[in-house]
Amino acid sequence: MTFSVQLELTATRKKSNIILALDFPFEKAEQRRQLLSTAQRVLGAAYPFLCAVKINHHLTLPLGLFDGVQSLVQKAHDLGLLAIMDCKVNDIGATNQVIAEYYYSAGFDALIANPFIGWEEGLKPIFDVAGRTQRGVILLVYMSHKGALEGYGQTVVDAETGEKTPQYITFAKKALQYKAGGAIVGATYPEKIREIHHILKEKVPIISPGIGAQGGEVEAAIKAGARYLIVGRAVAQAADPAAAAKAFRDSAKQAL
């Protein structure tokens, strides 16, 4: 079963398309031991209103992959959620292969990779490991921050035909070609979601970060074509994570 199918089944069972990003601010050394318990508490409170959890360097750096993060992945699985590693893999193939092996060994169901690196000796080793371990690869197509235009929005000129294409359109086509488990498109750019959804249709689901703290809006993202919404600080750092997660879940259900 592919990752995208697993995510769809989980979203249907949980009646939620919300993915929680466990993003917390920097903590000084004496406070870092609290990060794991904080993450466990937030996850334990919000999980009824989620379909998956996303973890990135906010927790992997201070906690360690196998020392702390792996336990969060296991907790997510125990709660019926999928776990996504937001490592934005962006290196040469040999390094990418080892990175993928480690994250999948820690239990992650999918990881996020940057298509800038190309296929041969770039993305291919990641997809090879994912195929062998029955995990997913999600591609960055257009990020949610203000500077995304400088990279993902630049114009690419085909050396043979001279045809000019926006970079994010080429990435969307790659996500389709490689049968990626998802495509990341920032919720802060609903017009890009709409344009990319026109290419991907329902074959590769759009996963949109930037909801909440970055200004992305639930209804706009969903109506433009996003299938899943990533919410981070607005839930992870909320006074009441469960209430915050429920509010986003309910808003998404209403928009759908």
Image (cartoon, grey):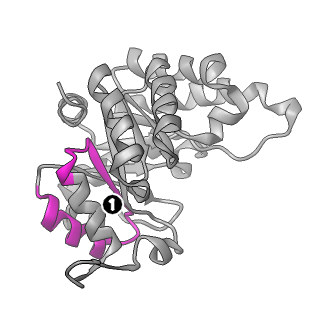
Residue 82 percent coordinates (x, y): 35, 28
Q: Quadrant of residue 48?
A: top left
Residue 191 magenta-highlighted? yes
Residue at 26% x, 70% y is: 169
Badge 1 element: helix
Q: Is residue 186 left or right of residue 161?
A: right
Q: Quadrant for the N terminus, please.
A: top left
For residue 192, above or below residue 175: below
Above/below status of 208 relative to 243: below
Q: Residue at x 56, y 42 (%)?
A: 236
The answer to whether residue 148 is seen in the rendering is yes
Residue in the image at 61% along x and 24% along y: 65
Query: Is 256 positioned to the left or the right of 213 in the image?
Result: left
Q: Is residue 75 left or right of residue 58?
A: left
Instruction: Write down the region rendered in magenta.
Output: 176-201
Give yes or no for residue 196 being in the magenta stretch. Answer: yes
Task: Please give the name of the residue rendered at 16% of the width and 58% of the height, measured from the top-left corner.
Answer: 200
In the image, residue 160 above or below residue 35: below
Q: Is residue 163 above or below residue 243?
A: below
Residue 117 position within the rendered picture, expressed as x and y whole percent measured from the top left:
43, 54
Q: Residues within 10 Å of mark 1 (few under 14, many from 20)?
A: many
Q: Which residue in the rendered view is the most extreme toward the right?
A: 30
Q: Most extreme residue toward the front, as rendered?
A: 160
- The residue under label 1 is 218
| Residue 226 visible in the displayed image | no
Horizontal and vertical percent for residue 109? Answer: 36, 27
Side of 158 where 144 appears, left or right? right
**Camera-side residue: 205 or 239?**
205
Amino acid under disc 1: Val
Count of marks, rendered view: 1
Which image quadrant: the C terminus? Answer: bottom left
From the viewer's side, name the closer residue of 245 and 102: 102
